[in-house]
Image (cartoon, grey):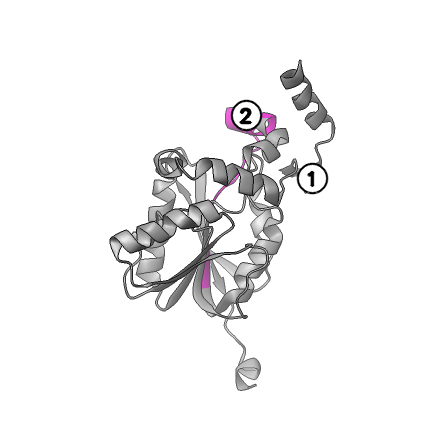
Amino acid sequence: MISNSRPKARRTNVPVQKSGGRIVHIGHIHEDAVRSAYKRWAPVYDHTFGKVATEGRHHAVEAINRNRVGSVLEVGVGTGLSLPDYKRDLEIVGIDLSREMLEKARQRVAEVGLTNVKGLHEMDAGELEFPDNSFDTTVAMYVMTVVPDPEKVMRELSRVTKPGGEVVIVNHFSQEEGVRGWVERRMAPFADLLGWRPVFDHSRVMVCDDLKLVERRSLRPFGIFTMMRFEKAAATSAIAAE
């Protein structure tokens, strides 16, 4: 009786947000739900979702290694699975909301001897504690569907990225049609229990006027995840002169 009544209660109070006739958001997600979910996942993450997400991590890091120099901020660094893949002349800083995940990331850095990782910090992606224009590249992999306010996080990524730098996103974006779309909509009311949003439209990351989309690529397996690369507008000569 208890387990059957909870889903019904949640379904009756689930918000649905539409834009241009498209469903862009269903359900609530809260910071406490994220902390709780990743505390549960931390011991087994590398061997479960970490495996599923391998392709997206590799694509994003390869693009950064190929195109970028200088400093990289990885938002949602988790257990640090991607850290050994960055080329060693990049200086890496990672942040995550989960203390348990960060502990595993620090162990990985020590075991592999990643001297180019300059810091791993417990921090809210929506309230980055870095000055404007701090990093040459910012990357957020599998983050946007788990944060309470993805638009705010996108603006923070843009803020801390230097003019002319890049913001790289790897994320799940939902479908309107087909079996996958049907399944995503049925799962969506339970976003707070899952710790991520099954329904998440790409428009939710297209909110920064100073970011230009330069690449969008569907990734294996099955195109469930997408990599998006944005270039931040270079400073104008007037601003540069100041």
In the rendered structure, does residue 187 fall within the stretch colored magenta?
no
Nearer-the-camera pick, 125 or 37 = 37
Res 17 label: 1
Relative to 43, say whether 135 is above or below. Answer: below
Quadrant housing residue 116: bottom left
**Residue under circle 2?**
183
Using the rendered image of the protein, determine whether residue 77 is visible from the camera's viewpoint: yes
Q: Is residue 65 left or right of residue 127?
A: left
**Which amino acid type is marked by label 1?**
Gln
Quadrant for the C terminus, please. Answer: bottom right
The range drawn in magenta is 166-186
Q: Earlier in the sequence, mark 2 or mark 1?
A: 1
Can you name the residue that lies furthest to the bottom here? 241
Q: Are marks 2 and 1 in contact (CB under 8 Å)?
A: no
Quadrant for the N terminus, please. Answer: top right
Relative to 178, say whether 30 is above or below. Answer: below
**Which amino acid type is marked by label 2?**
Val
Which residue lies at the image location 37% right of the left edge and 37% below the top edge? 220
Nearer-the-camera pick, 219 or 44 = 44
